[in-house]
Image: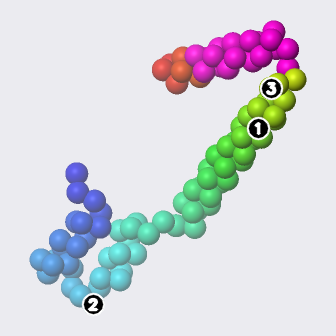
Amino acid sequence: MASIRGELTGLIEQGAVPRTEVAQAVAHSGLYPTGRAWGVFLDRLLLWLGTLALVCGVLFFIAYNWAEMGRGLRFGLVQAALVIAIGVYGWYQG
């Protein structure tokens, strides 16, 4: 499947789109994202960055306090991490 940009370039080179109407063809092709598309992109980007920051914070908190934790708590944390990983895998596999 060819990209929109490639198809548009091919049409311009073949002369199917006159040079005077290239800007209008690009505008109608949806080649550039709209303001709403940018908003959705930024919303999801910030959501993922926030999630990453939260996970890193929890990870660093546990790593800093690892030596002071008892063996049972450390074992429980490792087991909980495994159960969560298996649960997420099962959820994605549906």
Q: Is residue 6 above or below residue 68?
A: below
Q: Nearer the viewer, mark 2 or mark 1?
A: 1
Is residue 51 found inside the magenta-colored segment of the image?
no
Q: In screen coordinates, is 44 left or right of 80?
A: left
Q: Residue at x 40, y 75 (%)?
A: 27
Whether residue 31 appears in this view of the structure is: yes
Residue lying furthest left: 14
Q: Secondary structure at mark 1?
A: helix
| Quadrant of the image occupied by residue 10 | bottom left
Badge 2: few (under 14), some or many (20 or more) residues near its Cα, within 10 Å?
few
Q: Which residues are magenta?
A: 69-87
Q: Are marks 2 and 1 in contact (CB under 8 Å)?
A: no
| Quadrant of the image occupied by residue 91 | top right
Q: Secondary structure at mark 2?
A: helix
| Quadrant of the image occupied by residue 6 | bottom left
The residue singled out by tag 2 in the image is: 20
Q: Is residue 27 above or below residue 46?
A: below
Is residue 76 found inside the magenta-colored segment of the image?
yes
Badge 3: few (under 14), some or many (20 or more) residues near its Cα, within 10 Å?
few
The residue singled out by tag 3 in the image is: 66
The residue singled out by tag 1 in the image is: 60
* Residue 2: image location, x then y, percent: 23, 57
Which coloring applies here?
rainbow
Q: Which mark is residue 39?
A: none
Residue kind at label 1, given as amino acid type: Phe
